[in-house]
Image (spheres, rainbow, N blue to C red):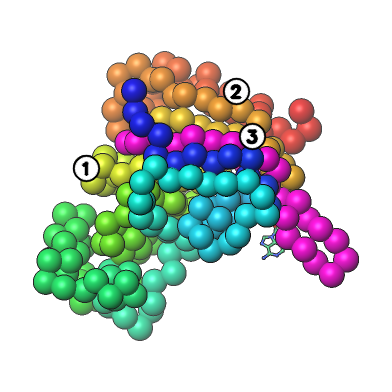
Amino acid sequence: MNKNILTINNLSKSYYTKEKEILVLDNINMNIKENTITAIVGPSGCGKSTLLKILAGLEKESSGSILFNGKKKIGFMLQTDSLFPWKTVLENSLIGLEIENKKNKKSIKKVHDLLEKYGLNEFKNKYPSSLSGGMRQRVALIRTLATNPDILLLDEPYSALDYQTRLKLSDDLYRIIKSEGKVVLMITHDIAEAISMADRIIVLTKRPCKIKKEYTVKLTNKSFPIENRKALEFSEYYDKIWRDLDVNL
Ligand SMILES: Nc1ncnc2c1ncn2[C@@H]1O[C@H](COP(=O)(O)OP(=O)(O)OP(=O)(O)O)[C@@H](O)[C@H]1O
Ligand SMILES: [Mg+2]
């Protein structure tokens, strides 16, 4: 049995405008275990990004608690790839290390190795504008991995990409996550992406956001994401989650 790495207890969050309080997260409880990929799906505007921002420490919860099992480092990949256009692929990949003042021989070598491993070696000295969307997302991921986080928070990592690229990248991402042994919490709009990648899927309600359902994904002959789409159980999960997401039910 995998150990809990992160526990979220009774987490709530409100934003305040001049006139009113907007309750966004309403009593969220969640356990995240080692070596797992958890996908979060939910209606637009329900509070998914807010949840990740709180976990990353960029927003403060209104009540409840977040407990990490030991000292855990968080890597957060935002909803947009947010590369600096005036910096090269290599320079962009090194930014996280620079910010943390951890740029040294060893960490720089790791970035070169990651770029090599994920097919970006020839593009190291190119600027983001000359890369495809999929390549840019890979650079953003390498930048996040470079600082060696234990937990990766991915906010719709492929939302800006075309279908073909998303499929290819989901396999890439899966390979990267598994070979680096990370815990992943990822938001996606795409039910098929969630089923094909995740060990667990959490479905959220519309705002104020609560947990509506949770699924442990068990697929026959579980393999890489593209292959997983052919699993017998795939369409059954798809139909259930599709129904869960119907805001009228
Ligand atoms: N800083 C803020 N101040 C006030 N309201 C905010 C703030 N940030 C987010 N909100 C509101 O909180 C709600 C949830 O926003 P959030 O970005 O978490 O949703 P989301 O589920 O990620 O949406 P999407 O699927 O469109 O990315 C929205 O109604 C949004 O308008
Ligand atoms: Mg969002």
Query: Is 98 on the left-hand or right-hand side of 33?
Result: left
Is residue 20 magenta-colored?
yes
Tell which of 120 and 68 is nearer to you.
68
Crowding around mark 3 (Cα neighbors within 10 Å: few <14, some 14 to 19, many 20+) is some
Q: Are marks 2 and 3 in contact (CB under 8 Å)?
A: no
The secondary element bearing badge 1 is classed as helix
- Residue 87 lies, with reference to residue 241, above or below; the image says below
Q: Which residue is mark 3?
A: 211
Name the amino acid, label 1: Ser
Which one is in front, 25 or 72? Answer: 72
Q: Is residue 148 left or right of residue 117?
A: right
Give SS at disc 3. strand
Compare marks 1 and 3 and give the one earlier in the sequence.
1
The amino acid on which the numbered mark 2 sits, given as a three-letter code, is Lys
**Residue ID for mark 2:** 240
How many numbered dots are placed on residues in this image? 3
Q: Residue at x 54, y 57 (%)?
A: 53
Q: Amino acid at mark 3?
A: Ile
* Tag in front: 2 or 3: 3
Q: Is residue 132 magenta?
A: no
Picture layout, residue 101 above or below residue 148 = below
Element type where label 2 sits in the image: helix
Identify the residue at image location x=44%, y=24%. Answer: 217
User: Can I make out residue 225 in this image?
Assistant: no
Label 1 or label 3, whichever lies nearer to me, is 3
The numbered dot on residue 179 is: 1
In depth, the one of 67 and 87 nearer the eye is 67
